[in-house]
Image (cartoon, rainbow, N blue to C red):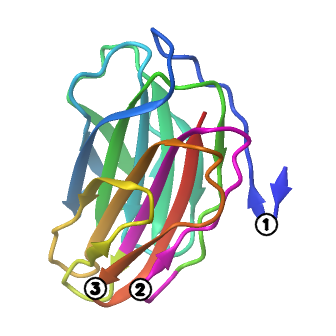
Amino acid sequence: CRVGGVMLISHGLRAAVGGGGPTFIDVAGTIVNSASSVSANLPSGIAAGDLLVMFVSIATATGNTITTPSGWTQFLAQVTGPRTGAYYKVADGSEGATQSVTLSSGGNTASFNVLLIRGQGLTYTVGAFAASDTTSPITNAGITPTSSGLLLGFWGIRANGTSPITVTGGPSGMSLANVASGYTGNDAMTNAVYYQDWAATATGTREITTSGSIDSSRSLLLQIQ
């Protein structure tokens, strides 16, 4: 269904071994330049039944697509502006240290964050990717979850030039998981993820503040119940 212009989606996720509420455990980031086959780092300590959530952002407006990795499912993909995707996988415990991700072109900077979630529930609420902000603050489109859960906020930011965007302030009530950034070539990418371990029906928007010249951005809120 669509509420206030935001798509709310319920999707089955197999419950983690041991049950309990969804909790952020760990994260691994990766940033590469000019690669069409990327070995994205995975968090350590993955166990069977854990949930992995991957956020990908590529410094391209046209011509580069993300192939959903084998064994993963797409939450959402944004095909205009900086190419951006969100994917998930319920772990079987044999994942290893990296995940291969294929891009249709190798000429752009790409940044990845993969989060390890434990004790996840059975549904999620995901908003649409927010329209591109070119100035700070960068604000996500809001969501209205039906129940409490783990709130994730993702920002993929393409710099207007060779210096990556620096995150200077996080969203209210959320903690920093990781910022994947640092490549200093043309159209440098910054991939920032924040979390709130037990957000009670976390309605509304979230925003981050940044420094540096922004070319374009995409951001997303996701809650796992």
| Residue 136 tag number | 2
Cβ–Cβ below 8 Å for labels 2 and 1?
no
Secondary structure beneath dot 2 equals loop
* CA distance separating discs 3 and 2: 7 Å
According to the picture, the residue beneath numbered tag 3 turns out to be 211
* CA distance separating discs 2 and 1: 23 Å
Q: Does residue 89 lie above or below 102 as drawn?
A: above
Secondary structure beneath dot 1 equals loop
Cβ–Cβ below 8 Å for labels 3 and 2?
yes
Crowding at dot 1, Cα within 10 Å, few <14 / some 14-19 / many 20+, comes out as few
Residue range (magenta):
133-157
Out of 152 and 111, give the one closest to the viewer.
152
Q: Nearer the N terminus, badge 1 or badge 3? A: 1
Q: Nearer the N terminus, badge 3 or badge 2? A: 2
According to the picture, the residue beneath numbered tag 1 turns out to be 5
Q: Nearer the N terminus, badge 2 or badge 1? A: 1
| Residue 67 tag number | none
Q: What is the three-letter code of the residue carrying label 3?
A: Ser
Crowding at dot 3, Cα within 10 Å, few <14 / some 14-19 / many 20+, comes out as some
Q: Is residue 48 visible?
A: yes
Residue in the image at 45% along x and 65% along y: 172
* CA distance separating discs 1 and 3: 29 Å
Picture coordinates of residue 67 (x, y %)? 47, 46
Secondary structure beneath dot 3 equals strand
Quadrant of the rendered structure where residue 107 is?
Answer: bottom left
Q: What is the three-letter code of the residue carrying label 1?
A: Gly
Report if residue 165 lies within the magenta region: no
